[in-house]
């Protein structure tokens, strides 16, 4: 298996459905109370690309993409139409805190924070979009002296940020996914239309 650094057709992806999934055990006690246990430390996203297929051309594009990925075998990039930015439509270098300098550390993985005071979730961002990442040290944008690996989402500084300096970043990102089926069930609804009732995709976690 491999990961193909290519994005699923964007116009189809933006018409799809999906979002994060959690795994929680809920046990009901004899007295009616309950105990809950979260089995996953991280959420996992699932999508259905079938809702984005609107024409024969769309279906042909999906068919070609599916065949090249060999069904479930190879991963690829997916653009989540709702959640693909560190902040607003245009990322700012102070959108997300990614660490604090100690004068020695040079690598800082990108992450996105969800929530506030109660129990915020820090989501690792593994597939930032090339050319969209902006970085700040102590609130001041760093125009040079760093690089980002778009295959892992790790920012590397040439010189370690000073001790106590807040490191932040802004970015656009994709989700690493794979098809969750090995068979496409295509229905030709008319001469220039096709429908695939379900094209499930699942996020690839490290």
Image (spheres, rainbow, N blue to C red):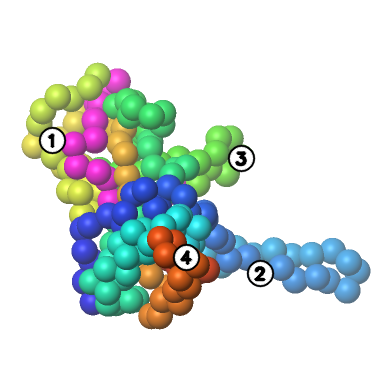
Name which of mark 3 and mark 4 comes first in the sequence.
3
Give the mark toward the camera: 3 or 2.
2
Mark pair 4, 1: CA separation: 53 Å
User: Circle 2 sits on which residue?
Assistant: 25
Sequence-earlier tag: 4 or 1:
1
Q: Residue at x 25, y 43 (%)?
A: 129
Q: CA gap, disc 4 to disc 2?
A: 45 Å
Q: Residue at x 27, y 45 (%)?
A: 128
Identify which residue, 186 or 163, lies in the foreground: 186
Give the spatial CA distance, label 3 vs label 1: 33 Å
| Mark 1, residue position | 146
Q: Which residues are magenta?
A: 122-139
Query: CA–CA distance between discs 3 and 2?
Result: 21 Å
The residue to which callout 4 is attached is 190
Residue 183 visible at all:
yes
Circle 1 — which element?
A: strand
Say which element carries label 2. Answer: strand
Precedes in sequence: disc 2 or disc 1: 2
Q: Earlier in the sequence, mark 3 or mark 1?
A: 3
Q: Is residue 44 left or right of residue 99?
A: right
Identify the element where label 4 is drawn: strand
Q: Position of residue 111 (x, y in %)?
A: 36, 44
- Frontmost of labels 4 and 2 is 4
The answer to whether residue 173 is above or below residue 42 is above
Q: Nearer the viewer, residue 140 or 8?
A: 8
Quarter of the picture holding the C terminus: bottom left
Foreground disc of the pair 3, 4: 4
* Residue 46 visible to an observer of this rendering: no
């Amino acid at each position: 298996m491999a990961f193909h650094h290519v994005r699923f057709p964007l116009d189809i992806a933006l018409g799809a459905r999906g979002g994060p999934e959690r795994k929680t055990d809920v046990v009901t006690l004899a007295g009616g109370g309950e105990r809950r246990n979260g089995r996953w430390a991280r959420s996992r996203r699932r999508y259905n690309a079938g809702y984005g297929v609107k024409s024969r051309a769309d279906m042909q594009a999906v068919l070609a993409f599916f065949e090249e990925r060999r069904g479930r075998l190879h991963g690829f990039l997916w653009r989540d139409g709702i959640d693909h930015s560190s902040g607003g439509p245009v990322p700012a270098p102070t959108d997300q805190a990614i660490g604090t300098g100690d004068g020695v550390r040079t690598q800082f993985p990108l992450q996105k924070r969800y929530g506030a005071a109660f129990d915020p979730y820090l989501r690792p961002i593994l597939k930032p979009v090339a050319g969209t990442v902006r970085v700040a040290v102590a609130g001041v944008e760093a125009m040079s002296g760093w690089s980002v690996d778009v295959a892992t989402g790790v920012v590397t500084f040439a010189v370690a940020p000073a001790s106590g300096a807040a490191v932040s970043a802004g970015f656009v990102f994709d989700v690493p996914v794979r098809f969750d089926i090995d068979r496409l069930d295509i229905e030709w609804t008319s001469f220039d239309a096709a429908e695939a009732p379900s094209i499930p995709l699942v996020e690839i976690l490290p």
